Image (cartoon, rainbow, N blue to C red):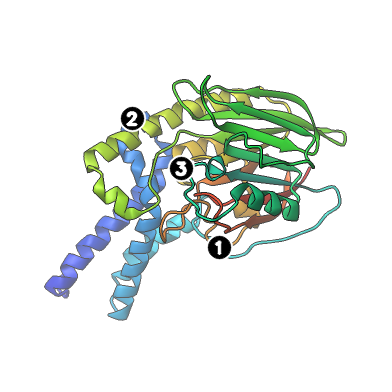
Amino acid sequence: MKSLSFLNKIAFFLNALLACMLLMGYLIRFIPPHFYPPLSVLTLAIPFLIIGNLLFVLYWLFQFKRHFLVSVFVLLIGFFQEATLFEFFGKSLEEEGSFKVMTFNVRMFNFNNALKDVNVPREIEQLIAKEDPDILSFQEYTLVTSFNLDGYPYKYFKLQGNSSSFGLSIFSKYKIVNQGSLDFPDSMNNAIFVDVLKDEDTLRIYNLHMQTLALQPQIGNLRQEDSKQLLGRLGQSFKQQEEQTEMVLAHQATCKYPMVVNGDFNNTAYSYAYHKIRGDKKDTFEEAGSGFGRTFIFDFIPIRIDFILVDPQIEVLDFHNYEQELSDHYPIMTQLKL
């Protein structure tokens, strides 16, 4: 530190602070949010913290100073843990007997007219016709006469609440032999499931829509909200996600079939909810995806909050992100084999 200029001493202090925050962010997934809900907000900041540490690595390297090792050490810890921000190598395989699963938060098919001059139901129909998934999960689904999926004879949907106009749905080319809803209490969010019969195998499909954080997709909007109020609101949402996670885990524990768990988790891969629900399952993006895997439109930050998780015995052959702006989320699809 004695060899550093005053400016570089300040820079190193900020660097150490960001590195400690990132290290803490990696550990948050092991801590139930109810212990101290505001702490869980760090999971949303991890992309910012990673970018900040990368910039400090470049800053110190440009000056030929070994202080870059602080951020490199913390970034390497993140690289070797189960949740990653970026995948370098994807894969794409075709095998007989495989099937495709897609999940998409459709934001009520542009009900609030956020996308101008776009026939969202028709565009989604065309995307599905082109990609031809065998099983479809929708969040924020609503019944609209302009949206029809004739190629899916089996379907189950559940609108949350007696007066709600939106909810969850699952469309399947395979026969649905069982279905149900978890009915999250005191929430407009929910989880549903179906058991489908594929050839001689029964497969359980979960469609999750975890507690909404109600984040605006622009950083500027967050700055306008009182920080104490924002932390309190997010902390309460994280507590609800913890309770909903326990309901999902308890329900899954009774399932004797191979499982596919997909949907909008409203949190990142560094969160407690994701960590617990994933368990020993495979994240299909990490198995076969590439790039940042962004699924939520949030300015320039690559946020991944939509997932498809599968039991270990299910082989992941392919994964794809679709960056078509038909909602505030992007659809994702994977190809699997039992």
Mark closest to the chain's N terminus, 2 or 3: 2
Q: For the residues marked 1 and 3, what is the alpha-carbon distance in whole angstroms?
A: 19 Å
Q: Residue at x 62, y 42 (%)?
A: 309
Q: Quadrant of residue 204?
A: top right
Residue at mark 1: 291
Return the disc, 1 or 3, that comes first in the chain's sequence: 3
Categorize mark 1 by other alpha carbons within 10 Å: few (<14), some (14-19), many (20+).
some
Q: For the residue labelled by badge 3, is the local secondary structure a helix, a strand or a loop?
A: loop
Q: Residues within 10 Å of mark 2 (few under 14, many from 20)?
A: few
Q: Nearer the viewer, residue 35 or 237?
A: 237
Q: Residue 287 at what x, y percent from top left? A: 64, 54
Tell me what residue is drawn at x 39 percent, y 44 percent: 27
Q: Which residue is mark 3?
A: 267
Residue that carries the numbered disc 2 in the rendered image: 35
- Kind of residue at disc 2: Phe
Instruction: Compute the Cα span from label 1 to label 2.
Output: 34 Å
Q: Position of residue 52 (x, y in %)?
A: 33, 63
Please identify, in this view, whether the residue under mark 1 or under mark 2 is nearer the observer. Answer: 1
- Label 1: which secondary element: loop
